[in-house]
Image (cartoon, rainbow, N blue to C red):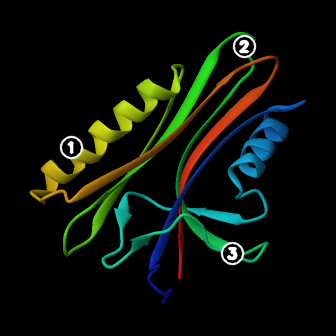
Amino acid sequence: MLPTPRKVKLAAGACEGATPLNAFDGALLAAGIGNLNLLKVSSILPPGCVLEDGFDVPPGSLTPTAFGTLTCEEPGRTIAAAIGVGFSADDYGVIMEFEGHCGRAEAEERVGLMVREGFAMRGKTLASVHVLGVEHRVVRTGAVIAAAVLWY
């Protein structure tokens, strides 16, 4: 059985690359999570998890992460990704991610609404919401990522 993460940090980045994979890799690096092995998780923030500005995760670590990402090869197109975490006062929380062909402000607004709806669907009281987004205007091949990185 895996341990339950106790920390979460938000990260976001954007990059151009020669290929879609290079653009995605560059976005990971820009977000500060490019040297981790991300294990995609869904939408639940563990009870007792605290938001931190940053923490060290050893390179190559298997890292539980909820993320939204988008890669685009349409020059001039704006792409965005946003991550939102909602905390309850005394229980588990919710993580939501969004990616789309829009700007950062729209992505952040949409993911914030998603967090609120996630709490409403569960009949839970929302104590706080934290959102982080990023946008990028594609030159040739661009990528964006917004992530909630969980750690122990």
Which of the 4 image quarters holds residue 80?
top right
In the image as oriented, which residue stretches furthest toward the left?
123
Q: Which residue is mark 3?
A: 57
In the image as oriented, which residue stretches furthest toward the right?
18
Q: Measure the alpha-carbon separation of dots 2 and 3.
A: 34 Å
User: Is 72 situated above or below 143?
Assistant: above
In the image as oriented, which residue stretches furthest toward the top?
76
Mark 1, secondary structure of its residue: helix
Task: Nearest to the eye among marks 2 and 3: give it.
Answer: 3
> Tag 3: Cα neighbours inside 10 Å, few (<14), some, or many (≥20)?
some
Q: Is residue 42 left or right of residue 69?
A: left
107 and 100: which is toward the camera: 107
Mark 2, secondary structure of its residue: loop
> Tag 2: Cα neighbours inside 10 Å, few (<14), some, or many (≥20)?
some
Q: Which residue is mark 1?
A: 117
Q: Earlier in the sequence, mark 1 or mark 2?
A: 2
Which residue sits at x=54%, y=63%?
Answer: 53
Task: Pinpoint residue 26: horizontal percent, then vertical percent.
Answer: 80, 43
The kind of residue tagged 1 is Glu
Q: Which residue is mark 2?
A: 74
Mark 3, secondary structure of its residue: loop
Which residue sits at x=75%, y=19%?
Answer: 73
Task: Pinpoint residue 111: horizontal percent, then vertical percent.
Answer: 37, 38
The kind of residue tagged 2 is Glu
18 and 105: which is toward the camera: 105
> Tag 1: Cα neighbours inside 10 Å, few (<14), some, or many (≥20)?
few
113 and 132: which is toward the camera: 132
The kind of residue tagged 3 is Val
